[in-house]
Amino acid sequence: MAITNERPAGYTFLALLYEDAYFPDHVLDRGTAVLGALCERIEAERPADLPALYALTAVATEAFNDLEAAFEEAGSEIETVAREEIGEAFRVIATAYGFADADPEQLIAERAW
């Protein structure tokens, strides 16, 4: 399924991280795929309220938790800059789908990074 919302479809997720050689592109590509899948899921399920949105972002956040090992294997980690960039991507997604009032911390509450 292709993302139909123009804002996330035209947004370069994790752009700041791709510019830094510390973060391996092949792992970032997996993170970008997680964010794309979140957009697709939001479009398919159309959450009616913030709790429904948070349930979807929790699944995506857990997928990022799973990527931590891949970052470590590549000599990297999800550190402060990465946390902020990932959190910003979740905020952009929430806003693009009409949830501008979403709590940025709640969007990634399930994070282990």
Image (cartoon, rainbow, N blue to C red):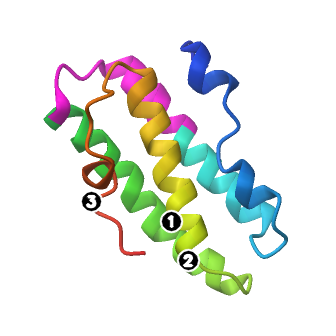
Q: Which quarter of the rendering shows the N terminus?
A: top right
Q: Main secondary structure of the magenta part?
A: helix
Neighbour tally class for label 1: few under 14, some 14-19, many 20 plus, Cα within 10 Å: some
Which SS class for mark 1? Answer: helix
Asked whether, in this view, residue 50 is left or right of residue 84, the answer is left
Identify the residue at image location x=46%, y=22%. Answer: 96
What amino acid does circle 2 point to? Glu
Q: CA distance from mark 3 to mark 2?
A: 16 Å
Neighbour tally class for label 3: few under 14, some 14-19, many 20 plus, Cα within 10 Å: some
What amino acid does circle 3 point to? Ala
Report if the CB atoms under discs 2 and 1 are less than 8 Å apart: yes
Tell me the number on the disc at residue 109. Answer: 3
Q: CA distance from mark 1 to mark 3?
A: 12 Å
Q: Which residue is mark 2?
A: 79
Q: Which residue is mark 1?
A: 83
What segment carries the magenta color? 36-50
Report if the CB atoms under discs 1 and 3 are less than 8 Å apart: no
Asked whether, in this view, residue 110 is left or right of residue 68, the answer is left
